[in-house]
Structures are given as C-alpha cells and as structure tokens.
Image (spheres, rainbow, N blue to C red):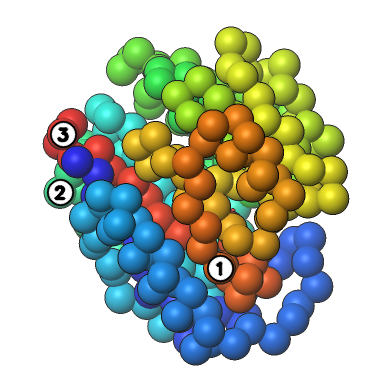
Amino acid sequence: MALAITRAVSPAIQHCELTHLSRQPIDLEAAMRQHESYEQCLVDLGCELLRLPAGQEMPDSVFVEDTAIVLDHCAVIARPGAESRRQETQAVAEVLGGYRTLFHINTPGTIDGGDVLVIGRNLYVGLSSRTNFNGMEQLRALVSPLGYHVNVVPVKDCLHLKTAVSRVGTTTLLINSKWVDSSSFEGMNVVEVDPREPMAANALLIGERVVYAASHKRTRERLEGAGISVHTVDVSELAKAEGGVTCCSLIVDVSHS
Ligand code: CIR
C-alpha cells in the first residue's frame, strides 16, 4: 500500500521561487482546487492520503517532493538549494520519521528531491542549480551501505532532473532528451516528449498507472500509444510556480515500514 504525503497550497504561493519562468499571477482558489483534484486522483489510484497543513509563510511548501528522498530502507531529508525553502523540511521529517529511519543532508550540501530519480537500487542525481556535488556525495555516503548506487546525471536548461525525465513504467522513462541524455539510463525504454511540449517529461507513476498534466496532450497520446494508462489532472496554476505532478507528493511504500 502507498501513502501519499501532500501539503496544502500556501497562501503565499504567489511569492514562489522562479528559475525559468516569468512571474504570472496565480489564482490561489484555483490552485487549491487543482491541488485537491490531484489528491483525489492519488486516492482513486489507491493511495492513502496524509496532507500536511500549508506552510503559511513558505510559498513553495506544496512541492513536498523536494524536501526528502524516500527509499524502501530509509528516507533522506533534503537540504533544498533555495534558501527560502529550507524551513519546509521540518514538518515533512516529523511525519516521515514514523515510517522510515531518517538521515539528513547537511551544510554545505544542497539537494532537492526533484533532482533524484529512483529506479530500484539506482539513484540518478541531477546536478542542477539546486543540487550540488557535496549534496550528491553526502547522499551517496548515506545510501551506499544500504546497497544503493548513486549515478550522477548531467542535466541542463531545466529546474530539476525530474523536469527532464521521469518514470512511466517499471522499465520505461518519459524524457526530454534536449535536457538530459537517455544514455545515462542504461537498460530503460524511453518515450520522448513531443518537441512542442518541452515541459511534458514530468509524470508520476503510481503502481502501473501514471498521473499526468492535462495540458500535455500530444505527449499524452505518445504515452497511451505505448500502452501506458494515463490519468490526467489540471495543474495549470501550480505550473505557473514551476511545479509538476511529481513535485506535489512524496510516495511512501508502507509495506516497507
Ligand atoms: C521552486 O522553484 O523550488 C518551486 N517554485 C518549484 C518546485 C518544483 N519542484 C519540483 O520540480 N520537484
């Protein structure tokens, strides 16, 4: 069974961090409604929901993915690259501590959960503007003794590794190969995003089904053509804050707790 940890949209979301997008007004009510539909989708796909209250003065706290890396054998509490996001980790650590042994990334390391793609015992870490070499090395030192391999992946022109590549099946990735090279992921099948939808590589795999942003219609057709079961959600307001579908939850396999 999977637990999905989410966090309500902060009333301060308008002041979110932005790296590749220009600031546009975010309709808070609409963002909250979209987030609730996203949560409902996770419940419909069999997840139990654990929603943390909004971080009132934490604009980006809805994007819980960045605060931790959850593995079957432990959870690593991140140290987000954006200083404004560092206080987000505390509430998440308090909850995750009930399900996993916790480790922490310490200064001067930085790592955002959005830069870590987990495929079995392989952790692929994107060195982005948020995740530095020291953060990656701390992660490696923490998880290597547990049998995990940390692979460094070059990534460019996007916020996080998982903006450029995410899992859509046990052995299948959805990728924008302009931002990350598919040769980094040996042995995986690849579905390429439609070139007109560069932001379309972020999908959330729950069991054998995929939660996916409704706006990426052409890439969705490619996924369905590859036999993947796609469940769409409208996350257009959250996308204005540079968030996608993986960012809004931490999925914990509770059979390992
Ligand atoms: C940020 O820049 O940190 C937020 N506005 C967006 C974070 C999105 N998270 C993710 O892709 N994992």
Query: Decide: marks 2, 1 in contact (CB < 8 A)?
Result: no
Q: Which residue is at a point 56% across and 68% down the rendered structure image?
A: 234
Amino acid type at circle 2 is Gly
- The residues bearing labels 3 and 2 have C-alpha atoms spaced at a distance of 13 Å
Quadrant where the N terminus is found in the figure:
top left
- The residues bearing labels 1 and 3 have C-alpha atoms spaced at a distance of 30 Å
Label 2 crowding class (10 Å Cα cut-off): few <14, some 14-19, many 20+?
few
Q: Position of residue 241 (x, y in %)?
A: 64, 70
Residue tagged 2: 98
Q: Is mark 3 within 8 Å of ligand 1?
A: no
Residue tagged 3: 255
Label 1 crowding class (10 Å Cα cut-off): few <14, some 14-19, many 20+?
some
Amino acid type at circle 1 is Asp
Q: Position of residue 222 (x, y in %)?
A: 68, 38
Is label 3 in a helix, a strand or a loop? helix
In front here: 110 or 158?
158
Q: Which residue is at a point 37% across and 50% down the rendered structure image?
A: 250
- Determine which of the numbered discs, if any, sits on residue 234 in the image: 1
Q: Taking 53 as reference, is 125 above or below it?
A: above
In front here: 217 or 180?
217
Badge 2 or badge 1: first in the primary sequence: 2
Is label 2 in a helix, a strand or a loop? loop
Badge 3 or badge 2: first in the primary sequence: 2
Query: Decide: marks 1, 3 in contact (CB < 8 A)?
Result: no
Label 3 crowding class (10 Å Cα cut-off): few <14, some 14-19, many 20+?
few
Amino acid type at circle 3 is Ser
Residue 125 visible: no
In front here: 80 or 172?
172
| Of labels 1 and 3, the one closer to you | 1
Q: Which quadrant of the structure image shows residue 90?
A: bottom left
